[in-house]
Image (cartoon, grey):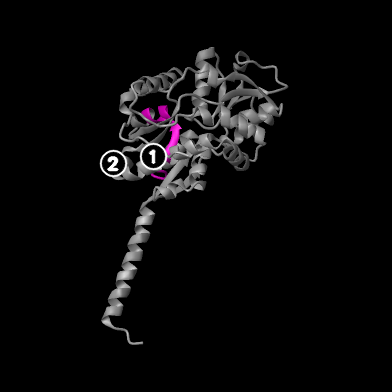
Amino acid sequence: MKITRCHILATITAVTVLGASAMAQAADTVRIGLPTKTYWPTTIAETAVRQKLFEKEGIAAELTIYRGGAETFEAMAAGAADVILDATSLVSAGRKKGVNSKVLANAAMGYYGWQLMTLSKSTLGVKDLNGKKVAITSAGSGSDLLALWTQQDKKIEFTRVPVGGGGLVPNLLAGNVDAAVVYSPLSFQISKSGEARTILDFSKEVPPNLAAGWIALDKYVQDKPHLVQKTLNALYGALMFMRANKDASVKLITELYEIPAEIAALEYENTIMKLETDGAMDGPKIPEQLQLALDMAKAGGMKDLGPASEIISTQFKPVLTKF
């Protein structure tokens, strides 16, 4: 076969198109940072992947699970994650240190399923933790915030021991710490098994506040607003899918975290069904609810926190998928 100039031009064109397509595909990948494995943000992100909701938005998602909220925030600050789920107080603290990010979408108005727990055989109450050791995921994380709040609210002092999300339960059960701030569904699981008991239920004790949200750096939002919008569409679409499909959601939670179906059902009813469904940050009560979260962090010992108005972004509102 004789290779003509037309063949060469056609080949160059085809290669150029394929190369541009590959570059576009790479550019449309969003790196999502999650604070720990067995936790509702991971459930939502995994649902979005399995239901192909990112694909429907024309983007790809890479999920990375970290050891706690502080590590997740640091990953975003370092440019290793684009959109993360984290404690809103970290956004305010970060801005004072030059990490300019904002809360893009409201995710949770409370600490659903979070409990301060001791071994079942322990006779310790909350007040008895004075001078003891309490496990948290990491310094600056949501579990650390709750530990600090407990100290301030109950007028006690204890040593906060960072063990990572995966280390909370093992260290508690091994007796390496006297208590642990445990998130669901792990809190439900060890309570149901009889291995541990709750001495403080944060979902009931802590006043409602904008505790967690989806967050991104200002620069990322400025450079790639369309990717942010598509990412939020997929994540909140996943939540709507879960709310509309209990059996499938309970099955996914069971499989993801290798827990009994009855524990997964508790997680569904007590956590998933209580999350914020539209993510809107332009509601009239949002500044007040976010300020409550910051005030709680200040009361717990976090310093140099700016006002809520500095960290609110009303640029995005997830376009919800109906199931």
| Amino acid at pointer 1 | Ala
Mark 2, residue position:
222
Instruction: Classify mark 1: residues with Cα within 10 Å, few (<14), some (14-19) or many (20+).
Output: some
Residue 130 quadrant: top right
Q: Is residue 317 above or below residue 111?
A: below
Horizontal and vertical percent position of residue 249 = 57, 38
Q: Is residue 4 above or below residue 190?
A: below
Q: Examine the structure image and report whether residue 88 is included in the region drawn in magenta.
A: yes
Quarter of the figure that contains the N terminus: bottom left
Horizontal and vertical percent position of residue 242 = 52, 37
Which residue is pictured at 53% across the width and 21% down the height?
Answer: 203
Which residue is pictured at 65% across the width and 37% down the height?
Answer: 259
Instruction: Classify mark 2: residues with Cα within 10 Å, few (<14), some (14-19) or many (20+).
Output: few
Span shown in magenta: 74-92
> Residue 131, labelled with which disc?
none
Horizontal and vertical percent position of residue 202 = 54, 21
Q: Examine the structure image and report whether residue 89 is included in the region drawn in magenta.
A: yes
Q: Which of marks 2 and 1 precedes in the sequence?
A: 1
Q: Nearer the viewer, residue 73 or 133?
A: 73
Q: Is residue 64 above or below residue 209?
A: below
Secondary structure under the numbered disc 2 in the rendered image: helix
Which residue is pictured at 41% across the width and 28% down the height?
Answer: 88
State left or right for residue 175 relative to residue 232: right
Secondary structure under the numbered disc 1 in the rendered image: helix
> Residue 77, labelled with which disc?
1
State left or right for residue 171 relative to residue 58: right
- The CA span between labels 1 and 2 is 15 Å
| Amino acid at pointer 2 | Gln
Could one spot residue 183 in this view of the protein?
no
